Image: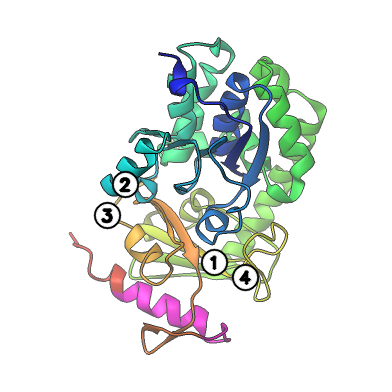
């Protein structure tokens, strides 16, 4: 039997980060004629891509969609239920969900059985580490070009992302890609930006009950848990980052809706940290999810701790944080 049961794939829908890009690149190496569409998790859950996804669509590193033909992922909150999986496979769908460190690893392990992916073999270790929160503080503070490459990938710079897709899927040597002028230029920009971001994090952040809370909404800046937790160090076991725009909307890659990202301080705590952060991400937002140590959701309208049907107001960020802190406080403490 051929790989993926001989499915014919015409579209690949993937997450817009390094893991999603490499997973998509590997699938595109196998399904060479397929069109690739990059999206965020909330766009799948919100139905934005319902008219795009069909049985000739592969989805990787994103939430499950029952209308696709191939589903490939590793996130715990994205795993189809037994009922969903049975219906999906009965109707001809192929599910490749495995509890490994990255969606790219799922794609690599499967596709390398039939195509030559040796150019990615050494590269995969850092992709796994970055997506699973397993890089060390010294690695994060290093000049590792793969780590810096990951910071340059942004769906607001879509032409660049598609260029990377073409290079990786064509089998180009990774070192050649990392030494491309456009990659080096963006890495240097990110290095210049990082020192400024640390100041913004300190100016807009505080630690409450050992969780760092950084409010970056409406600033135009985004950051990740590695930079926040490395900035606050041993003061925090995890962090909450508020980002996006008050007038943002799902699907607008230039103006994301008000959202929160939750990250374990992986420099202090390996594996899933001291608390399953998906309990925060899924407390109020049906579109929320991810890993126990790295996940996210939208800011939702709350009143007295309850979800209400209305537009967001100026108090909702604080309302959400207040409730997340209550949930966080239920963790086991040493």
Looking at marks 4 and 3 on the same chain, the residue that comes earlier in the sequence is marked by: 4
**Tag 2 and tag 3, C-beta contact below 8 Å:** yes
Residue 305 disc label: none
Quarter-of-image position of residue 307? bottom left
Is 153 situated above or below 200?
above
Is 180 situated above or below 276?
above
Q: Secondary structure at mark 3?
A: loop
Residue 274 disc label: 3
> Which span of residues is magenta-colored?
310-326
Residue 259 disc label: 1
Measured as percent of width and height from the top left, residue 235 is found at 38, 60
Quarter-of-image position of residue 238? bottom left
Q: Which residue is mark 4?
A: 217
Quadrant for the N terminus in the image: top left
Between 110 and 330, the one lying in front of the other is 110
In the image, 324: left or right of 48? left
Looking at marks 2 and 1 on the same chain, the residue that comes earlier in the sequence is marked by: 1
**Numbered marks: total:** 4
Measured as percent of width and height from the top left, residue 34 is found at 66, 29
């Amino acid at each position: 039997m051929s790989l993926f049961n001989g499915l014919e794939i015409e579209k690949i829908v993937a997450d817009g980060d390094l893991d999603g890009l490499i997973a998509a690149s590997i699938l595109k190496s196998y399904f060479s004629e397929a069109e690739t569409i990059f999206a965020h998790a909330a766009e799948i859950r919100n139905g934005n891509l319902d008219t795009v996804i069909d049985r000739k669509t592969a989805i990787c590193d994103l939430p499950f969609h029952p209308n696709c033909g191939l589903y490939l992922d590793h996130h715990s909150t994205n795993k189809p239920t037994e009922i969903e999986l049975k219906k999906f496979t009965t109707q001809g769908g192929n599910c490749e969900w495995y509890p490994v460190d990255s969606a790219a690893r799922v794609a690599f392990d499967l596709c390398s059985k039939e195509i030559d992916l040796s150019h990615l073999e050494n590269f995969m270790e850092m992709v796994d580490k970055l997506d699973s929160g397993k890089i060390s503080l010294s690695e994060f503070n290093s000049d590792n070009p793969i780590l810096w490459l990951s910071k340059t990938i942004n769906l607001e710079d879509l032409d660049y992302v598609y260029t990377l897709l073409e290079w990786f899927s064509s089998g180009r040597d990774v070192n050649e890609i990392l030494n491309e002028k456009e990659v080096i230029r963006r890495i240097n920009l990110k290095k210049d930006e990082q020192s400024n971001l640390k100041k913004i994090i300190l100016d807009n952040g505080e630690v409450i009950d050992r969780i760092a809370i950084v409010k970056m909404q409406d600033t135009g800046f985004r950051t990740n848990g590695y930079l926040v937790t490395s900035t606050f160090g041993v003061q925090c076991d995890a962090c909450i980052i508020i980002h996006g725009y008050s007038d943002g909307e799902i699907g607008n890659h230039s103006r994301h809706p008000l959202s929160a990202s939750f990250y374990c301080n992986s420099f202090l705590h390996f594996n899933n940290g001291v608390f399953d952060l998906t309990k925060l991400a899924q407390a109020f937002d049906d579109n929320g999810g991810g890993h126990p140590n790295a996940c996210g959701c939208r800011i939702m309208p709350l009143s007295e701790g309850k979800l209400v049907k209305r537009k967001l107001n100026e108090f909702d960020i604080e309302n959400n944080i207040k409730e997340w802190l209550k949930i966080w406080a239920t963790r086991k403490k040493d």
